Image (cartoon, rainbow, N blue to C red):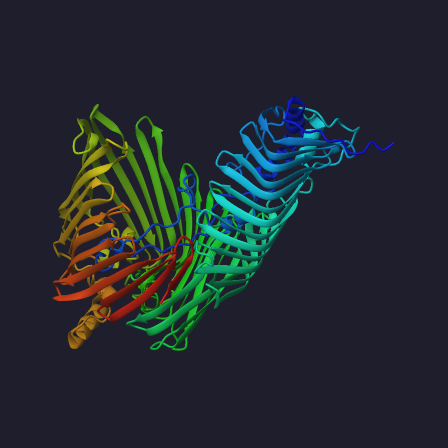
Amino acid sequence: MSIGRRRLWGRVGSEARAVIGAGAASMLAGWIAVCAGGSALAQTDSNAAATEVKPPRANFGRIPLGSAEPHAPRPGRRPEASPELKEERQTLSEAFADALSVGSAGVGFSMPDLDRLELEGAEADAFEYFWEDESVEMTGNVRFRLQDIHFSADTLVLKEDWAEIHALGNVVVQQGESTVWADEIIYTPAPLTELEQPLIDASPSGEDRERLRLGTVEGKRMHLADPTRELQAEEFAHDGTTRAGAFRAVKGHTGGYYFTAGEILFSGPGTGKGHDVTISTCDHDPPHYCIHFTDVEVERGEIVRGSNAQLQFGRLKTPLYWPRWSYRMGAPGAISVDFDSGRRAAIGYYVNVAQRFGVAPGVDLGVRLFPTTKEGVGLGLEGNYDFMDKPASRLFRSAGTWHTMYTTEDRGFTEWYHRYEPHEDTVALMQVEHWYDRDFVKDFYYDRYRDRTEPRTFANLTYTRPGYLVTGTVRKRTDNFVSETEYAPEITYHLLERPIAERLYFTFDTVNGYNEREPSGTHALRLINVARLSWDGELSDALNFVPFVEAEAAAYSEKRESEDPGYRFSSTFGTTFQTRFHKTYPGRFGFAAFKHVVVPSITYSYRPETSSLDVEETPRFDALDNMYGRSRVESKIANIVFGKDAKTGEVWQVARMTLYQGNDFWNELRKAEDYEIELDLRPRPWWGLQVAGERHSIAKDYDLDEPFFVERTLLQAYERILGRPFDQEKAYEFNARYGDYDRLLAYLYYDDPSEKRGFNGRVGFAYTKTQDRTFNREVLYGVGYKLGERWGVAMEHRYDFERDELYRQSYELRRDLHCWEAAIRFTDRPSGWDINLQFTIKALPGIKLKF
């Protein structure tokens, strides 16, 4: 007998509440399981970038004045990820991963407690029960609350045996600050595996709770919004059993990134593919610019591969194109767009363009084209690699980067930096730097290399243990304009200070290797051993004294002027007295308190005259070879004031003044006097005053420059003929390795962190003189200021009193262009004018265009 369809109308009562509690809560649990991260692509926070081995800066000639140049403050504000994520901005790859996610752990929706599905505040205009298919249909303002989840819809249909749950019309699911809107949602739990369960059940059984987690959900015109992202899709589907799903016609944003996608398919947690994907930091529709990918692939929640990546302005596609792009897992996710154009004094007008793309996981390769009007066309290859966290690779625990360039004018350079960590206590550093001429990198890359001195090539292996340190270094001179000591190789062992009796400490250092000094050609096998004993004594609770004795034995395979071996034995005796005072003072001027620390010390040392090897016969490779008799006293006093901010509780060094004095009572070769002062005042972390002064003078009883007599004489004659230095660095090397020098640096700086005021500036003075040559006596002044929300200006001048000229001046104007920033900079220096027009895409790491 056919029962037919029976209609029951009326207000929602206790039975309807039970039906809604069982069915709708089940539907919500399945849907929220998706939103809570069941299909989300996990993000990672690892950060293992390749480490570049940077050579130390040589202490040549002119004192650099100050640090970063005054800059035009950035007008407007950069897009922030969210209030919750302000401290850690997303990388581009993480943004792509979020674009393919419906939620993420810790933010957005969270899974309800399926053990207590208690319904509250259930309402509906009417419900209808159909005996034929045993389904329940709620219509008209359906709404209820499940724990902290609020649900509403025009219609809700619950079918028999949890077979299907269907929400229609103005579907809204809200939890905290996260909301999902949809025109339609269909939820189908996993199939039954045992006997049928009753439809009317206020709390699903354990089996049903598992089915809810493994069900499938489909929908149309979905819109998800939570504190860190927004996502819209015309169609979506997700299978809780296989963790696979799809989105079509996707649009949204995460943090400061805006994205679209024609289709997104994910096959499991953190794994998927996207087609016709764009990403931008511009919130206009269409965006002013974007990066378009034909296809992308995601693994472990990060974009790892992309095809046909192209920079696009509006609807115009640019020539900046990557056939295939890859991303190193765990490394900073920035697409390397490198385009620079303008004019430099040395090379004329130029275009510098490079494109990077991935050739294997963890390996990026780039090609650079650098045409110029004065120095021909440069072509280079570059890249980086990172196998630190890839055990399957033969290069496991290694990382590095390399750059090459060669021009049609036979100029160029090669650089390679490599780091290898075979064990946690062993590090190998390898570095190759070769410049075809001294000025190449400064002519082509002035902004990056203007403070560099000379290239260095070496390989170093360092083994570290708690009690000692062992190193091995091979260093080769690859450029004929470099003056340095080559190692072939040099092995060192350093026994760190260790107690051998009560208050008695011992250290030992040995340096052994074959050295050759260029360009003088001095060479020898050198063995140097230094042992030191010190005793930590106390005259009182406030006064320490440390007597010490040091013995040195050195052997050379050849003397400087003969092939006979040479041996040197020397010893040093002395003692150090040191105390420490500190006192706390009440706060003033916005500080809660001050603490003043005073650390004075005085040291006397005596080394008798060395008779075993004359100074003029000793090969000189570095400071270890300068062992001659002397009697010397040195004193130092450090005054340090710490302050605690009354509002923030921040503690920093408010003031520091250090005084140093060293005088020779007697010296075997030349008596030396040294005086130093350092002053650092920082009333606030962003502004302060720094002063550093140094004076070193000697009594010229012996000419240590004698080995360079011929070179120095020819060089000075050449300088007199031309009226200018032939080579400033070699002049310093030959004339002033052991000469008198005076240095002074004073520097007042201010960099207001306030977004509203946006002011920075600095004023400084630098003076450097070595022997009779003044390298610089100059004053610097510069300022940057933000003119409203759109404009910023900056200028900097350097005036050299020694040469009576304004030898460098720079001007910058910056303009906010919504999601862009534009800046034009004019720089005049002795070699001529540089002009650069720069466009920066805000908030997208690694994207910078300069003209």
Position of 262 relative to 271 (above/below): below
Is residue 240 at least partly visible in the picture? Answer: no
**Front residue of 689 and 498:** 689
- Residue 139 percent location from the top left of the image: 64, 35
Is residue 814 at least partly visible in the picture? Answer: yes
**Front residue of 44 and 280:** 280
- Residue 549 percent location from the top left of the image: 26, 37
Quarter holding residue 369: bottom left
Q: Quadrant of the C terminus?
A: bottom left
Position of 622 relative to 438 (above/below): above
**Front residue of 786 and 780:** 786
Q: In the picture provided, is 219 more to the left or to the right than 846? A: right
Position of 357 relative to 567 (above/below): below
Q: Quadrant of the N terminus?
A: top right
Quarter holding residue 238: top right
- Residue 159 percent location from the top left of the image: 72, 34
